Amino acid sequence: MAVLQGRDLIEPLDFSVEELDGLFDLSMRVMDRPGDFAKKCEGKLLATLFYEPSTRTRFSFEAAMLRLGGKVLGFSGEQNSSAAKGESIADTVRTVACYADIAVIRHPKEGSARVAAASADVPVINGGDGGHHHPTQTLTDLLTIRKEKGRLRNLRVGLCGDLKFGRTVHSLIKALARYEGMEFYLISPEELTVPEYVRKDIKGGNGSRCAEVERMQDVLPRLDILYMTRVQKERFFNEEDYVRLKDSYILDAEKMGLASADMIVMHPLPRVNEISTEVDADPRAVYFKQAKNGMYARMALIMALLGADN
């Protein structure tokens, strides 16, 4: 993975398919023998610049660096940084790069991570920028699919819920469309369908196909993967629209009865009520495994960008 040393990760296509496969191989080795990697980043510092709330992304990055023997510094919430005084992202990142060896930024504005990367002389990782990209969630998702299904090609993937604002969905589609024989089933109400540029990613993919449907039940029997998302209140300008659409799709035990025995259910979390808690006991529900896989994917990423994986 020396080819990744010193680079940034801003969007899923920053790394080639071959580079991603190498990261996943490394992630699997970390899963199997975590003790072998306990000192790989000893003496290194990770800066976490989180301008908006996060649980899984922030904690998994911090856990990843700590498990590699490194240390973490940073802030959670714009009010806890000099941004509250009006400091620009560029100046904040340029300053933090004086102290840290690598940085991850999460910000509500699209394009903020690219500004950060252009301002720093250390590797910068996009931890989510508005409704644009969330590439490390994509690494998590791809790693989970490879681990659970044994491949990243010839899969029928249903993506359900908020497909308009869901950055995890946009990034995952963009990444999966590069693999052979992918079929996408886009399940959403008319108001939350995928943007046109995402449809172009599918059409421009490696023989990918897609269908847009409004009823989850119509496609469940044919899916290999069902990727659920929440309707994100923070992306709405109108409270009335959010209330009207938030319960559009709820996966429960009855609907799971329509799915194949080897279909897996994924979710980037947090869950609100789009997956009933009764589904948690179903062996096909892998969303908490997915969250744990995110730590391993980020461990591999940090090592690769720092050149600490040898």
Image (spheres, rainbow, N blue to C red):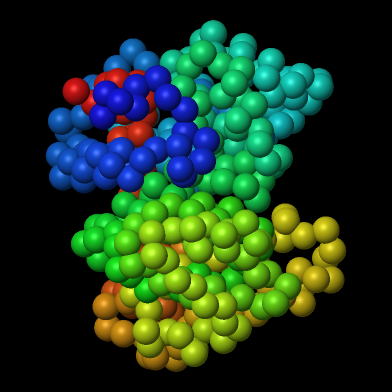
Q: Is residue 66 above or below residue 53?
A: above
The quadrant where residue 78 appears: top right
Where, quadrant-wise, is the C terminus in this rendering?
top left
- Asked if one can make out residue 184 in the rendered structure from this viewpoint, the answer is yes
Picture residue at 57% right of the left edge, 82% below the top: 213
How many numbered discs? 0
Depth check: give the residue in front, 306 or 111: 111
Picture residue at 34% right of the left edge, 22% below the top: 5
**Residue at the top extreme of this rendering:** 98
Picture residue at 59% right of the left edge, 71% below the top: 161
Q: Is residue 123 above or below residue 220?
A: above
Q: Is residue 308 above or below residue 57?
A: above
Residue 81 pos. (x, y %)? 69, 24
Where, quadrant-wise, is the N terminus in this rendering?
top left
Depth check: give the residue in front, 145 or 254: 145
Residue 300 pos. (x, y %)? 30, 35
The quadrant where residue 221 appears: bottom left
Depth check: give the residue in front, 305 or 60: 305
Picture residue at 66% right of the left edge, 61% below the top: 195
Residue 6 pos. (x, y %)? 40, 20
The quadrant where residue 239 appears: bottom right
